[in-house]
Amino acid sequence: MTPTWKPHEKHGTLSDKDKRELPESVFAFPGKRKEPMTDAGHVRNAIARFDQVQGVTDADRDLAFQNILAAAKHYGVDVAETNWRQLGKLPHTPNPAH
């Protein structure tokens, strides 16, 4: 599957207005406009929240994962997972409590 994600000039904290004005191409889930990825922090958030997104199909998740990989490569974010089904199974950050 070919990712649809494209970089955009908005970075940092996004207001609701900012999110509404973003093109669909910056979202992990473009049709649903969920999980904007405009910088490395947003890519990390999309990875961390991937398994919490509701109302999407497996096909939506396939595309979203490809979009996350494209955005991660662009922003220099390491992604250990090779498939979206691996997301949410292990903590994404080192935590001695786990």
Image: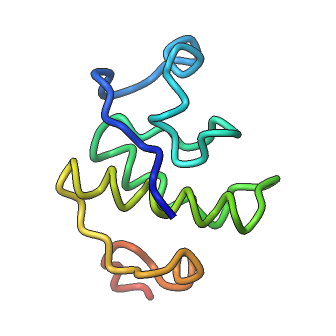
Residue furthest out toward the front: 2
Report whether 72 appears left or right of 64: left
Decide: is 9 above or below 63. above
Residue furthest out toward the right: 55
Say which of 39 and 1 sits in front: 1
**Rendered image quadrant of residue 77:** bottom left
Report whether 37 appears left or right of 31: left
Q: Residue at x 49, y 15 (%)?
A: 18
Colour treatment of the image: rainbow
Q: Residue at x 48, y 34 (%)?
A: 25
Image spot of residue 38 (x, y percent): 35, 34
**Rendered image quadrant of residue 96:** bottom left
Residue furthest out toward the left: 76
Decide: is 40 above or below 22. below
Q: Residue at x 23, y 57 (%)?
A: 73
Report whether 71 appears left or right of 55: left
Decide: is 81 above or below 63. below
Image spot of residue 37 (x, y percent): 41, 41
Say which of 9 and 50 sits in front: 9
Count of numbered marks = 0
Decide: is 47 above or below 41. below
Report whether 10 appears left or right of 88: left
Picture quarter with the C terminus: bottom left
Image spot of residue 46 (x, y percent): 48, 53
Q: Residue at x 59, y 81 (%)?
A: 85
